[in-house]
C-alpha cells in the first residue's frame, strides 16, 4: 500500500491542521483587505476548531475568543464583541499567575474597554481602560510604547458624542507624547529608521493636540454665538484666544528646528531657502498656518505655508491641485501683509500651473485671474491688471456667453480699469 492510500491519508484533517490552515488564510485575507464580515466568519470557525483541538487549554480558547471579539469590533458589532471579550478575560483569570498567557490580558482588556465604549457605557469603559493600562504595565513595564494603543482608544472615546471631554483627551495625548519621546530617547542613534518613525508618531500626536485646541476654541465660539441675544454681539470668551495661542506655541515648539526662510531686498520671502520637511512636519506646518490665520498672525502663517508647500511640490508636483491651493493661500496671506508684488508673482505662478491642470478656457481659472488683477491694481500696475482681467473675460465669454451676468460684471470692471489707466 503506497502513502496515498495509507489509512491516515484517507482520514479528514485533524482540527489542529484545519486551524493552522485557517489562521494562514486569515493572515493572508487581512493583508489583502478582506471584508470584515468574512474575517468574523473565519474567526467563528477558528473558535469552534479551538474548542475541538484544545478543549482544556484555557489560553488557546481565550486567545480565539479575543480575536473573534476584535473582529466583531472591526465590523461595528460592539455587543457581540463584548460577550467574547468578557469570556476571554474570565478564561485568562483562571490561569495560574506564572502562566505566559497572562501577556494576552492587556489586549483582552483593551478590546473589552473599546466594546464598552462603543456600547455607550463610558463609565465602565473608563474603568476598563485603566485596568488595561495597569495590565500593560505589569507585562511590559512602565511607560512602554504598547500602552499608546490603549491610550489612543481612550482618547477616541473622550471625543465621541456631543459632550466631548477635551481636558481628558489632552492628558491622554500628552501621555502618548511622553511615552514616544522616552522611546525615541532610548532608541540608538544608529537606528535612524526607528528614530524617524518615532518622530513621525510624535508629530502626529502633537498635531492632534493642536487640532483639539482649535476645535475646542470653535466650540466655545459657537456656544457664545448661540447664547447671544438676537441682534446682539456674542461675548468674547478669553479662553478662545488662549487655546489658539497654546496651539500655536505647541506647534512652534515642534517645528523650532526648521529655519525661517530669508527675506529678499524687496521684502518678499526667498522660498528657495525653505527647509525640506517630512510629510508629518509639512502637516504640522499647515496646522500652524491655520491657527496663525485665526489669530491674525500673518507673518507666522506665511512662513508656515512656505515651508509646507516645498514638501508638496516635491512629493506631488508643481501642477498638483493641493500644491496650487497652497500657493493661492500664500498669495492671500501676502495680500494681507501688503506684499502685493510677491502675491502677484505667486498668482501668476498659480495661473500657469492651473493651465497645466485644467483645460483651456476652464472657468476655474477666472478667480485666480481676478486675484492677480487685484494685486496689480494695488500696485497701480494698470496694464498687467487689464491683461489678467481680459483673459478672465475671454474665458467667461467662452464658458458662459457674452450676455451672462458674470461676463458683464467682468466687462464693467475692465471699463473702470481702462479709465484709470488713461488717467494715470
Image (spheres, rainbow, N blue to C red):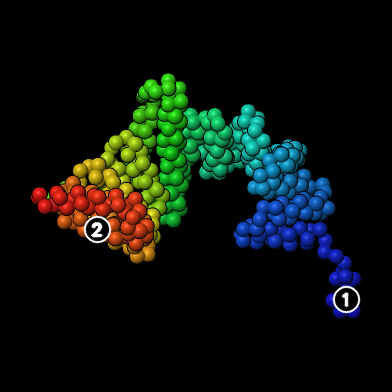
Name the residue furthest bottom: 2
The one nearer the camera, 11 or 191, is 11
Q: Position of residue 325 (x, y in %)?
A: 35, 52
Find disc 1 in the rendering and name its residue.
5
Question: Secondary structure beneath disc 2?
Answer: helix
The quadrant of the picture occupied by the N terminus is: bottom right
- Residue 390 badge: 2
Does 85 appear above or below 281? above
Q: Position of residue 351 (x, y in %)?
A: 29, 58
Q: Callout 2 environment at 10 Å: few (<14), some (14 to 19), or many (20+)? A: some
Q: Can residue 195 be seen here?
A: no
Q: Position of residue 73 (x, y in %)?
A: 66, 44
Tell me which residue sits at (13%, 52%) in the image.
421
Residue 159 lies left or right of residue 4; in this view the side is: left
Tell me which residue sits at (24%, 46%) in the image.
334
Q: Hey, which quadrant is residue 122 in on the image?
A: top right
Does 216 appear above or below 12? above
Tell me which residue sits at (33%, 51%) in the image.
406
Amino acid at each position: 500500500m503506497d502513502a496515498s492510500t495509507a489509512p491516515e491519508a484517507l482520514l479528514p484533517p485533524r482540527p489542529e491542521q484545519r486551524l493552522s490552515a485557517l489562521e494562514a488564510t486569515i493572515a493572508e485575507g487581512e493583508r489583502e483587505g478582506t471584508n470584515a464580515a468574512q474575517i468574523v466568519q473565519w474567526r467563528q470557525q477558528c473558535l469552534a476548531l479551538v474548542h475541538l483541538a484544545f478543549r482544556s487549554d484555557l489560553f488557546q480558547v481565550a486567545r480565539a475568543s479575543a480575536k473573534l471579539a476584535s473582529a466583531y469590533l472591526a465590523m461595528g458589532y460592539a455587543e457581540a464583541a463584548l460577550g467574547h471579550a468578557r469570556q476571554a478575560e474570565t478564561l485568562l483569570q483562571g490561569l495560574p499567575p506564572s502562566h505566559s498567557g497572562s501577556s494576552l490580558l492587556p489586549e483582552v482588556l483593551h478590546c473589552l474597554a473599546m466594546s464598552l465604549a462603543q456600547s455607550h457605557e463610558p463609565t465602565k469603559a473608563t474603568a476598563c481602560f485603566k485596568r488595561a493600562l495597569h495590565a500593560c504595565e505589569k507585562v511590559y513595564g512602565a511607560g512602554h510604547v504598547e500602552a499608546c494603543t490603549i491610550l489612543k482608544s481612550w482618547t477616541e472615546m473622550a471625543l465621541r458624542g456631543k459632550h466631548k471631554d477635551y481636558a481628558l483627551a489632552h492628558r491622554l495625548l500628552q501621555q502618548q507624547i511622553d511615552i514616544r519621546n522616552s522611546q525615541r530617547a532610548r532608541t540608538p542613534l544608529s537606528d535612524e529608521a526607528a528614530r524617524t518613525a518615532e518622530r513621525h508618531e510624535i508629530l502626529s500626536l502633537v498635531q492632534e493636540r493642536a487640532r483639539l485646541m482649535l476645535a475646542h476654541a470653535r466650540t466655545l465660539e459657537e456656544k457664545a454665538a448661540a447664547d447671544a441675544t438676537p441682534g446682539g454681539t456674542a461675548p468674547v470668551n478669553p479662553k478662545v484666544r488662549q487655546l489658539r495661542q497654546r496651539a500655536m506655541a505647541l506647534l512652534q515648539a515642534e517645528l523650532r528646528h526648521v529655519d525661517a526662510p530669508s527675506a529678499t531686498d524687496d521684502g518678499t520671502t526667498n522660498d528657495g531657502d525653505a527647509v525640506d520637511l517630512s510629510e508629518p512636519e509639512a502637516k504640522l506646518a499647515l496646522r500652524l498656518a491655520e491657527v496663525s490665520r485665526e489669530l491674525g498672525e500673518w507673518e507666522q502663517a506665511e512662513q508656515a505655508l512656505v515651508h509646507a508647500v516645498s514638501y508638496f511640490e516635491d512629493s506631488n508636483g508643481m501642477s498638483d491641485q493641493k500644491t496650487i491651493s497652497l500657493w493661492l493661500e500664500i498669495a492671500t496671506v501676502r495680500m494681507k501683509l501688503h506684499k502685493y508684488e510677491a502675491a502677484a508673482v505667486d498668482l501668476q505662478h498659480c495661473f500657469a500651473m492651473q493651465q497645466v491642470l485644467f483645460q483651456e478656457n476652464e472657468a476655474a481659472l477666472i478667480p485666480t485671474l481676478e486675484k492677480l488683477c487685484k494685486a496689480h491694481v494695488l500696485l497701480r500696475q494698470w496694464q498687467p491688471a487689464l491683461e489678467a482681467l481680459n483673459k478672465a473675460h475671454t474665458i467667461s465669454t467662452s464658458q458662459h456667453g457674452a450676455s451672462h451676468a458674470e461676463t458683464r460684471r467682468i466687462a464693467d470692471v475692465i471699463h473702470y480699469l481702462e479709465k484709470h489707466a488713461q488717467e494715470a
